[in-house]
Every structure is written in structure tokens, then in C-alpha cells.
Image (spheres, rainbow, N blue to C red):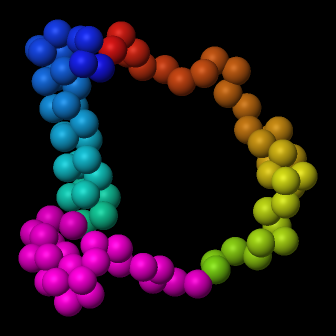
Amino acid sequence: MLAQPKSIRERMAKGVEEFVYNILVNVFNAEDTASIAIEDIIRTGTPDPGNKTGIIENPENWTKEQILEKGKLMDNPTGPSGDFDD
């Protein structure tokens, strides 16, 4: 990425910034939660929040063979669409 001109690097970084902001604010509803996160980090002494839940799916349903079978049901012959010029 550092081989790219500065204008392209800045455009790419801005795109990532906007994407992450959108995910945090509009998907995870995390707007104005920085103070909560900071307090939690200070209280626990680590930025790792740890697990919040236990196992939610039966591991027996996720064997290698079952995963391969589920993968065969996915069909996207055209591949992803988009502008991949960067």
C-alpha cells in the first residue's frame, strides 16, 4: 500500500474510516460509547472484554464434512461485484 501515491492512500484510509464508522454507529449502535469502553478498560486493566456468552451452536453440527456440504449449497458463479482498482 505504501507504494501507492499519497492521494490514493489517503482516499483508501478515508474509505476504511467511513466504513468502520458506519458499522459502529449504524449496525452496532455504538455512538457515544467511548467513555463506557474507557471505564471498562481502566476497571479490568485490559482492552480485551473477554467472552460475553457461551457456545450458541452445537459443535457436532460443524464438522469438516458438514461445512463442506453447506459450502456446496452456496452458489455465486459470477464472484463479487465492485470496483477493485485499488
Q: Is residue 16 magenta?
A: no
Give the residue drawn at x 29%, y 52%.
23
Image quarter (top left, top right, bottom left or bottom right) of the N terminus: top left
Image label count: 0
Q: State left or right for residue 52 relative to residue 56.
A: left
Give the residue drawn at x 13%, y 70%.
34
Q: Tell me: residue 56, above or below residue 24.
A: below
**Where does the image place residue 47, in percent across and percent down from the top left?**
28, 72
Q: State the residue in front, 46 or 54.
A: 46
The image quadrant of residue 4 is top left
The image quadrant of residue 19 is top left
Q: State the residue in front, 23 or 55.
A: 55
Residue occupying the far front of the picture: 45
Give the residue drawn at x 26%, y 87%.
44
Q: State left or right for residue 24 relative to residue 10.
A: right
Q: Tell me: residue 5, above or below residue 47.
A: above
Q: Tell me: residue 67, above or below residue 15.
A: below
Provide the residue span drawn in magenta.
30-54
**Where does the image place residue 43, in percent across and percent down from the top left?**
20, 89
Give the residue drawn at x 58%, y 84%.
54
| Residue 17 visible in the picture | yes
Q: State left or right for residue 10 relative to residue 77.
A: left
**Where does the image place residue 46, in percent across and percent down from the top left?**
28, 77
Image quarter (top left, top right, bottom left or bottom right) of the C terminus: top left
Residue occupying the far right of the picture: 65
Q: State the residue in front, 59 or 23.
A: 59
Q: Tell me: residue 17, above or below residue 47.
A: above
Q: Is residue 46 magenta?
A: yes
| Residue 36 visible in the picture | no
Q: State the residue in front, 78 or 51.
A: 51
